[in-house]
Image (tube, coloured by chain):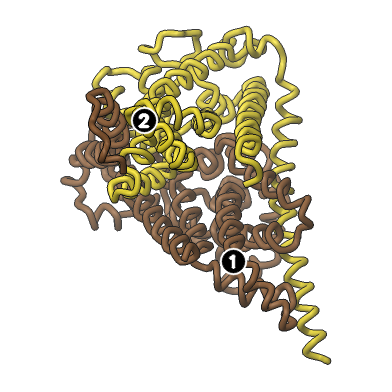
Chain colours: A yellow, B brown
């Protein structure tokens, strides 16, 4: 009987411990989100979006330049990264399906997804900043695009593989060449999945700071010239949070709140889309 | 493979375009490696390989550089954060797969994964403004007055608690990698066939005994792969630690001292490097980081693939 009781106690102890672990995880999530919310709301106002930064140390001003810069950099990164990723994923799932080549590329992309983003920043610095002689928005967009490619490529590959092979055969039977089958049948079947991959990759790069530090850098003035240094929210947060002025800290928190809400919204949207299209995973 | 189809010229063109796009991954990896090596060649020539890795000097004024102090910081924060994160992550995975009532499984799993979606700069800022003061005022003094009094372990907690140190950085890093480890561990646990679990229950095993003797042995490859993946992530994390580590190039015995990791020195010094050899040495650090994380991630991928293959049989 003693053994029996000991086993029950041990069981209870272990289960309580893992429940505590789960609540530790939830605790951090709530702690961080609540903290960003409380601090961020204080700095959130219209002039944050509509005005450019005031000179250092002077109250007021906003981060219009950083919002616009962030949008531009992310937009061009998406424009470069998504087509490459989708097309690359198409090759792996269609033309090279089942070949060793496809396996190798897909494993390498999985590794690329987790490669330190700051290394990609140094890589682009050598390619696009050093030769030009100054930081520029294009370099930032390319750096983010490089981070997007493996993410989009892998989701596209997975989503295309989910489209039943019989669907393709039905189209082949009508005499359609493979490229038409892919574009008109397979892409349609996987559209929601691919869109989710694109959304998740945007969420991934929208919060990246490290690859922008040495590429687009920062600019305290409003600029839409991609050939010049360009402000971004994340780099601005880094600079403002490390800076000495209280008004900078407030704005950094507000910017953090905006970017966190944006990313959480896109992430949740992506999950909802997947669930809606493919049912419960 | 529909190789039997007659090749349409447009089809050939499309397949060529997609092939080139998929090659971009290899081109990128090769390009990164090539650029990092060629940019750091100046420093490699001057300081050598073993000498650079073992030298603790980092003196931009005298232009003498070594990687030992940053490697030290990188390894200490990574190992510590794994120590903090892995037990919690495995606990979360156990809770989600075995304990939580069904309606709670999804929401809690999603909530933990949302932790992974929060950008690292937010972690960094939260660490600087919220966690660092808490560490400096409450946790670190408490540690000093308890564990710090012990003979050998006490050395780890010497110095004035400032909150900007190895311990705080490791705590933030551990919060960041918990979701990665937890979601991979959860997927691995879920792969255990329920028939095996049920037969263990049938002979009277408690829930914990099923987890410990059936689920964990069955999924250990996957869990291990997840841990190594988190290791790779932690190695390259920049912004979360950049705020709270202090970027001080030193090898210290105390966890309450400032230090530097490869990523933090890159973030802080890259744009300030004023001489060729300085920049080249920073590229050398980036090269070491790239190789370290690439190898780690490749190993984790190997384990995960092996686990996958075993279960799919």
In the image, A215 versus B254, the foreground residue is: A215
Q: Chain of mark 2?
A: A
Which of the image's four quarters has the N terminus of chain B? top left
Does the image show residue B62? no
Answer with left or right where residue A25 lies relative to residue A100.
right
The residue where tag 2 is placed is A87
Does the image show residue B186? yes
The local secondary structure at tag 2 comes to helix
In the image, A144 versus A101, the foreground residue is: A101
Answer with left or right where residue A209 lies relative to residue B101.
left
Residue B139 image-quadrant placement: bottom right
The local secondary structure at tag 1 comes to loop
Residue A30, x across and y down, in percent:
74, 42
Answer with left or right where residue A216 lies relative to residue B128.
left
Q: Residue at x 28, y 18 (%)?
A: A133
The span from disc 1 to disc 2 (Cα, nearest Å) is 35 Å
Callout 2: 10 Å neighbours few (<14), some, many (20+)?
many
Residue B44, x across and y down, in percent:
20, 46
In the image, B104 versus B54, the foreground residue is: B104
Q: Chain of mark 1?
A: B
Residue B212, x across and y down, in percent:
64, 74
Callout 1: 10 Å neighbours few (<14), some, many (20+)?
some
Residue B167 image-quadrant placement: bottom right
> Which disc, if any, is residue A116?
none
Residue B201, x across and y down, in percent:
72, 77
Answer with left or right where residue B259 lies relative to residue A143.
right
The residue where tag 1 is placed is B192
């Amino acid at each position: 009987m003693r053994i029996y009781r000991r086993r029950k106690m041990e069981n209870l102890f272990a289960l309580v411990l893992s429940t505590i672990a789960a609540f530790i995880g939830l605790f951090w999530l709530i702690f961080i989100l609540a903290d960003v919310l409380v601090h961020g709301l204080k700095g959130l106002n219209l002039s944050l979006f509509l005005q450019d930064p005031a000179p250092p140390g002077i109250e007021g001003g906003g981060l219009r330049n950083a919002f616009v810069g962030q949008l531009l950099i992310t937009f061009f990164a998406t424009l470069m990264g998504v087509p490459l990723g989708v097309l690359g994923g198409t090759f792996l799932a269609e033309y090279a399906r089942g070949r060793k080549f496809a396996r190798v590329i897909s494993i390498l992309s999985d590794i690329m997804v987790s490669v330190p983003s700051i290394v990609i920043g140094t890589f682009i610095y050598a390619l696009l900043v050093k030769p030009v002689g100054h930081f520029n928005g294009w370099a930032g967009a390319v750096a983010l695009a490089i981070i997007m490619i493996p993410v989009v490529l892998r989701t596209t590959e997975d989503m295309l593989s989910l489209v039943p092979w019989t669907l393709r055969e039905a189209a082949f039977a009508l005499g359609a060449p493979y490229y038409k089958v892919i574009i008109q049948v397979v892409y349609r079947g996987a559209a929601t999945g691919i869109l989710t991959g694109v959304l998740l990759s945007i969420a991934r790069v929208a919060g990246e700071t490290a690859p922008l530090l040495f590429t687009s850098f920062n600019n305290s003035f409003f600029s839409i010239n991609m050939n010049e240094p360009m402000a971004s929210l994340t780099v601005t947060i880094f600079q403002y949070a490390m800076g000495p002025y209280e008004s900078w800290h407030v704005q950094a928190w507000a910017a953090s709140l905006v970017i966190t809400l944006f990313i959480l919204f896109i992430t949740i949207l992506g999950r909802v889309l997947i669930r809606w299209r493919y049912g419960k995973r | 493979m529909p190789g039997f189809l007659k090749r349409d010229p447009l089809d050939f063109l499309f397949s060529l375009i997609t092939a080139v796009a998929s090659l971009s991954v290899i081109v990128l990896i090769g390009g990164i490696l090539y650029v990092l090596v060629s940019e750091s060649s100046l420093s490699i020539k001057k300081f050598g390989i073993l000498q650079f890795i073992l030298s603790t000097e980092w003196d931009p004024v005298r232009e003498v550089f070594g990687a030992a102090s940053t490697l030290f910081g990188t390894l200490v924060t990574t190992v510590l954060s794994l120590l903090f994160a892995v037990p919690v992550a495995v606990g979360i995975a156990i809770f989600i797969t075995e304990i939580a009532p069904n309606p709670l499984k999804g929401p809690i799993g999603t909530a933990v994964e949302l932790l992974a979606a929060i950008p690292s700069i937010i972690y960094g800022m939260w660490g600087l403004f919220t966690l660092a003061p808490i560490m400096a005022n409450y946790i670190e003094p408490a540690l000093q007055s308890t564990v710090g009094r012990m003979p050998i372990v006490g050395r780890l907690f010497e110095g004035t608690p400032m909150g900007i140190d190895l311990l705080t950085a490791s705590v933030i890093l551990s919060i960041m990698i918990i979701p990665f480890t937890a979601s991979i561990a959860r997927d691995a646990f879920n792969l255990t066939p329920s028939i095996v679990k049920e037969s263990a229950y049938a002979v009277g095993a408690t829930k914990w005994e099923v987890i410990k003797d059936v689920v964990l042995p069955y999924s250990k490859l996957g869990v291990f792969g997840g841990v190594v993946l988190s290791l790779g992530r932690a190695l390259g994390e920049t912004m979360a630690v950049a705020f709270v580590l202090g970027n001080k190039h030193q090898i210290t015995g105390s966890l309450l001292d400032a230090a530097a990791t490869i990523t933090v020195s890159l973030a802080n010094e890259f744009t300030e490097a004023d001489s060729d050899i300085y920049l080249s040495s920073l590229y050398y650090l980036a090269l070491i980081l790239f190789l370290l994380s690439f190898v780690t991630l490749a190993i984790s991928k190997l384990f995960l693939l092996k686990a996958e293959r075993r279960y799919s049989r």
